[in-house]
Structure formats: C-alpha cells, structure tokens
C-alpha cells in the first residue's frame, strides 16, 4: 500500500507554448483535418536561432552549414545565426549566447540550435542551467549532435 500523507501538493505546470506556437499547432491540426479556412491557409514555420561558439582560429563554417541544413530538414525558419569567438568563457560571460537566449525570451524564436553541447558548455551543470533558462522562456535548446560529440 502506498501512502501519500507526507507528500507536498505539486505545483501546477505552466503552459510553455507561446501564442504563435499555439496558432501554428492549431493551423496544422486544422489543415490535417481538411479544414482550411482563410486564416489557417498560411501556416507559420517554427523559428530557431543558430548559436555557434569556438576559439579564435577554429572552423565555425562547417558547423554553421550543418546546423543550417539540419534546420532545413525540419522546415525550421532560421531567424538569426550568432557566431561567437569566446573560447573557454563560461556561458554567463558570453554576449552571443545571451542574445540567442533573449531571442527565445522575446518570442522571436522557439529554439536555440547549436552544433554540439560543448558550444554551450563542456560542463554538464552549466549546459543544464542554460537549457533550463531557455525552457522557462518557452523554448528549447537543441544540439544537432545529440550524442554529445563535438563536430
């Protein structure tokens, strides 16, 4: 038998989708059902911002091309590409990363796409902190290389 006496009541989850995301999802569902009134005829594409970071003389062009192709495969609209030559600075010290997160906070993008986890931070706790901040803003952090290998 399971007892729930000592458990605290859980806080109700807040919706994470922006109004634009909800409209897009509604339009997709209506189109799939064959209902295409004038206001759902144009379906907004999901938007992302690409963030790339590397040392001063590293190749960022290849990861940029790979992320662009990756976004195209999913039909994502790229609102901005932010390249930063910050090297080993922690995430809090990078202006470009702050700009990418702000794009999600402002509703300009629904995701930050990057080539690998190390472009955010090689330290798992720092990476998780950035991911949580983006999720609290209603978006998500996505690495093209899901296995965690750097390109």
Image: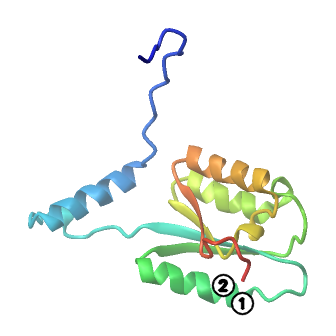
Q: Nearer the viewer, residue 64 or 151?
A: 151
**Image position, residue 146 (x, y; %):** 60, 71
Q: Does the residue at mark 2 contact the one at mark 1 (Cβ under 8 Å)?
A: yes
Circle 2 SS class: helix
Q: In which quadrant is the C terminus drawn?
A: bottom right
- Name the side, left or right, on which 73 lies relative to 91: left
Q: In which quadrant is the N terminus drawn?
A: top left
Residue located 49% across and 22% down the image: 10
What label sits on residue 64 in the rendered view?
2
Residue located 46% across and 75% down the image: 77
**Image position, residue 143 (x, y; %):** 62, 69
Q: Which of 78 and 2 is in front in this view?
A: 2
Determine the image quadrant of residue 46: bottom left
How many residues crowd around disc 1 within 10 Å: few (fewer than 14), some, or many (20 or more)? Answer: few
Residue located 59% across and 69% down the image: 49
Residue located 90% across and 87% down the image: 57
User: Relative to 113, does residue 110 appear above or below in the rendering?
Assistant: above
- Name the side, left or right, on which 78 lies relative to 19: right
What label sits on residue 143 in the rendered view?
none
How many residues crowd around disc 2 within 10 Å: few (fewer than 14), some, or many (20 or more)? Answer: some
Circle 1 SS class: helix
Instruction: Find disc 1 in the rendering and name its residue.
Output: 61
């Amino acid at each position: 038998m399971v007892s729930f006496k000592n458990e605290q009541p859980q806080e109700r989850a807040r919706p994470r989708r922006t109004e634009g995301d909800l409209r897009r999802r509604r339009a997709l569902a209506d189109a799939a059902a064959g209902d295409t009134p004038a206001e759902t005829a144009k379906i907004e594409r999901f938007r992302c911002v690409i963030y790339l970071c590397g040392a001063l003389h590293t190749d960022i062009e290849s990861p940029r091309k790979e992320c662009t192709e990756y976004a195209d495969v999913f039909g994502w609209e790229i609102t901005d590409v932010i390249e930063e030559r910050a090297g080993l600075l922690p995430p809090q010290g990078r202006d470009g990363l702050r700009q990418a997160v702000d794009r999600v906070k402002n509703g300009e993008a629904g995701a930050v796409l990057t080539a690998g986890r190390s472009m955010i931070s090689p330290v798992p706790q720092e990476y998780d902190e950035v991911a949580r901040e983006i999720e609290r803003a209603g978006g998500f952090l996505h690495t093209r290389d899901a296995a965690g290998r750097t390109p």
